Image: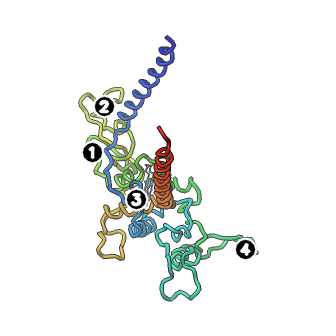
Amino acid sequence: MQMKTILRPLIAASVAFAAAGAAHASSAKVEEYKAIDWSFNGAFGSYDKESVQRGFQVYKTVCASCHAVEQLSFRNLGDKGGPFHLDKCPEGVPAGTDCSTPGSNPIVKAIAAEYQITDGPDDSGDMFQRPGLPSDKFPRPFANPQQARAANGGALPPNLALVIKARHDGPDYVYSLLTGYEEAPASVQLSPTQHYNPYFTGDMSQLLKPEYRNAEGHPLDGVEVPLGGVLAMASPLSDGVVDYADEHVPETVDQYAKDVVQFLTWASEPKMEERKSLGVVTMGYLLILTLILFFSYRAIWSKVEH
Ligand code: HEC
């Protein structure tokens, strides 16, 4: 009896939970994400440094006009594990410089200096522009969210350094989204600021043309509602828009998307490699400890007389 009183609410809760899960699965009608074998997947995974470097170039050339990477400073690019980290200085750098510190890293200094940063106020109270320094944050494309929305048909371009963590299966999702734009299906009517993408969460039944809907606005029987949704961002990438220095790397939407996802994943977790290698060291330590305990246990008990 007592067991039953405990079990009943538990069973009810788990049934409700399962039902909620099923309902969720059926309302999120998006195309299944393309699954990429990312170099950073798994317990031993690490970033592909060259890909992160190219991804930074894609971000800078294409995405930065709309999206911020808020918590990132230029110097992070030269941190250990960062895409432009140097162990030793390249030729031409004065002797005695420690290029492994981001503040003295010549590549990071050059990247920062390409940006104009608003600083101030100066002695007369005015703000002024100066070239960026490694310690500066990446500038945001818009002064405030209102300005960002006004420039983007009312939609807010999210902080890209968080989007990978904020979305389920972030890397596969962002890759699929960037490579997944399609012509809108014939059964829907879109406004010029709506762009169809089968990987974006939405409700396409609201966009069906009138002839596919009944008096209440619901889809007619037998009408298939397209997967995905519409977003305010038009496909940002097209073949050839970014010039890569390495001519062996294809300049395609697919490659740009992979590279920018490597960059954004690094930006969302710059310390991932340290965390993983700490994990491996800890597992090794525990394994050795277990072996020592096991053999000392055997050694001690072998001397006990039966
Ligand atoms: C012209 C401005 C513009 C450019 C350029 C741009 N975006 Fe966007 N992006 C937006 C806007 C606006 C949204 C919000 C869309 C919405 O919610 O309808 C958005 C949304 C997104 C999202 C979020 C989707 C979600 O799940 O909410 C991702 C990821 C994204 N952009 C990645 C990128 C990447 C990567 C680039 C560069 C390759 C890029 N964007 C270039 C304007 C832009």
Q: Amino acid at mark 3?
A: Gly
Question: Mark 1 is on which residue type?
Answer: Pro
Residue visible at 61% across and 70% down in the picture? 135
Measured in 3D between alpha carbons, the distance from the residue under mark 4 to the one under mark 1, in whole angstroms, is 56 Å
Q: Tell me where residue 11 appears, x and y as whole percent.
A: 44, 21
Element on which disc 3 rests: loop
**Disc 1 designates what residue?**
185
Amino acid type shown at disc 2: Pro
- Quick one: label 2, few (<14), some, or many (20+) residues within 10 Å? many
| Quadrant position of ligand 1 | bottom left
Q: Sequence-wise, which precedes: disc 4 or disc 2?
A: 4
Badge 1 vs badge 2, beta-carbon distance below 8 Å = no
Q: Which residue position is annotated with label 3?
A: 45
Q: Measure how far apart labels 3 and 4 are at the Cα level.
A: 47 Å
Q: Is residue 295 left or right of residue 216?
A: right
Are the residues flagged by discs 3 and 1 in contact, CB closer than 8 Å? no
Residue labelled with disc 4: 122
> For residue 132, what is the image quadrant?
bottom right
> Which numbered circle lies on residue 219?
2
Of marks 3 and 1, the one in the foreground: 3
Q: Is residue 53 above or below residue 277?
A: below
**36 relative position to 296: left or right:** left
Label ID, residue 106: none
Residue count near mark 1 (Cα–Cα under 10 Å), binned few <14, some 14–19, many ≥20: few
The answer to whether marks 4 and 2 mark residues whose Cβ atoms lie closer than 8 Å is no
Marks 3,4: beta carbons within 8 A:
no
Q: Secondary structure at mark 1?
A: loop
Q: Nearer the viewer, mark 3 or mark 4?
A: 3
Report the amino acid beneath label 4.
Asp
Q: Nearer the viewer, residue 263 or 189?
A: 263
